[in-house]
Image: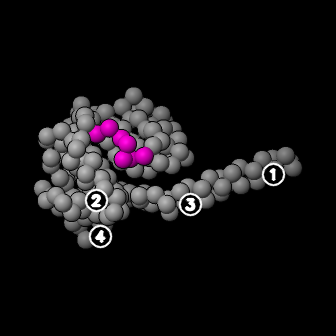
Amino acid sequence: METAAFIVQGVVVLGLAALYATLGFTIFSHAPYVPSRRRELTRMLRVAAIRPGERVVDLGSGDGKIVLAAARAGAEAFGVERQPLLVLISRLRAGLKGLSARARFRTGNLFHADLRTADVVFCYLLPKAMARLHEKLERELKPGARVVASAFAIRAWEPAIVDRDGETAPIFLYRR
């Protein structure tokens, strides 16, 4: 009985350590981990109008919700996330949902992600990071690519659509 209690305590301690490490990581990143609510996710996907066969990239993919939804829609979806624990969680979720072939995740810096073949790019970043991302999008996106930004606009671009519902953050759609 003591062994079982020791194992449970160990799992709890490791879980808390991972949580604190993740929270600490977000303080110094370009965007803290803020999971998208279902309503916001639905709006982002509607605005993006993802078609089967498209290549979707989520910069700062967090727990992988957007990537998994894009894969369910038939896209080849790819998430880039700085926090290894969130990448692991996303990969596990993709495997459990049978989406590993179309939903892939990697640990890395979103500013190093290759966007040249992306049809749709999702981002939910702080304003300073959005300004920096703008330069990368200008350099790498192909004509016709779409960018869906949640909460914070890309100031240098005029959005094609601004979806506001009053209860969640605005969603911006940009076309390259």
Residue 13: percent from the left, percent from the top?
71, 55
The residue wearing badge 2 is 131
Comes first in the chain, label 2 or label 1: 1
Quadrant of residue 145 within the rendered picture: top left
Give amino acid for label 1. Answer: Ala
Residue 57: percent from the left, percent from the top?
32, 42
Give the residues in magenta: 109-115
Depth check, front residue: 98 or 26: 26
Residue found 41% across the figure and 43% down from its top:
80
Residue found 12% across the figure and 56% down from its top:
160
Depth check, front residue: 117 or 133: 133
Mark 1 → mark 4, Cα distance in angstroms: 44 Å
Q: Residue furthest right?
A: 2
Comes first in the chain, label 1 or label 4: 1
Quadrant of residue 167 within the rendered picture: bottom left
Label 3: which secondary element = helix
Residue 174 visible in this rendered orientation of the protein: yes
The residue wearing badge 4 is 167
The nearer-to-camera label among 4 and 3 is 3
The nearer-to-camera label among 3 and 1 is 3
Comes first in the chain, label 3 or label 1: 1
Q: Mark 1, residues whose alpha carbon is within 10 Å: few (<14), some, or many (≥20)?
A: few
